[in-house]
Image (cartoon, rainbow, N blue to C red):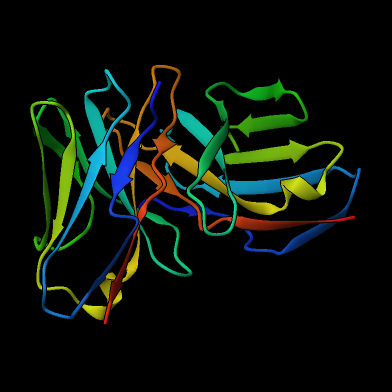
Amino acid sequence: EAGVTQSPTHLIKTRGQQATLRCSPISGHTSVYWYQQALGLGLQFLLWYDEGEERNRGNFPPRFSGRQFPNYSSELNVNALELEDSALYLCASSPPTGGYTFGSGTRLTVV
Amino acid sequence: QKEVEQNSGPLSVPEGAIASLNCTYSDRGSQSFFWYRQYSGKSPELIMFIYSNGDKEDGRFTAQLNKASQYVSLLIRDSQPSDSATYLCAVEEPGGYQKVTFGTGTKLQVIP
């Protein structure tokens, strides 16, 4: 069974640009969770998508947005990038047993 | 603001000893608790989850939950150098909104 896949692995953007991050959950899983892990901070909940709908959102500004496609893959968009957006962005599936299975993450660097 | 608190460490233990990692949480209604291990530069990996008061054992790992004290712990027996990592405590908020709050993690160093 393939795990959670994320792309790209690394992304370097200039302040003010837009970044698009992609995630495919474990096959058969309909939910996708996005988390941000900035240096020195814990994982911060960003978004939860299920069955194509945004179900819950963390305490992030509207320039963080996303969507989920009919095949349950997901995209996270970050507009008007700021230096503090530099972080590891993690996508996760949730197996029936509980908890998260994370992808390997996308490291976003804003310069 | 829901909080999950962990001592950042580092916690240093000799090889073969028991490592004890602790976590407190603020939301008394929380029902699901998780421990993740994160090696440097890698993504977190789920190692234990616990839903009921008491102990849950899985190999060298034991998770302990005390809801009255709002306290979760992870014991690692016979610690190995390969256990050196950051351990993240995570608590799922009640209400079915699938929102999990993570602590900032405790860095464990197992000294050979």
- Residue B35 drawn above or below residue A107: above
**On the rendered structure, is B38 left or right of A18?**
right
Q: x and y percent of residue A25 in the render? A: 29, 31
Residue A53 is drawn in which quadrant? top left
Quadrant housing the C terminus of chain B:
bottom right
**Residue at point 44% right, 69% down?**
A39
**On the rendered structure, is A40 left or right of A75?**
right
- Residue A78 drawn above or below residue B44: below
**On the rendered structure, is B42 left or right of B29?**
right
Q: x and y percent of residue A30 in the render? A: 22, 24
Q: x and y percent of residue B72 in the render? A: 61, 39
Residue B75 is drawn in which quadrant? top right
A6 or A52, nearer to the observer: A6
Quadrant housing the N terminus of chain B:
bottom left
**Residue at point 46% right, 47% down?**
B26
**Residue at point 33% right, 26% down?**
A26
Residue B77 is drawn in which quadrant? top right
Number of numbered callouts drawn: 0
Q: x and y percent of residue A57 in the render? A: 19, 47
**Residue at point 18% right, 34% down?**
A73
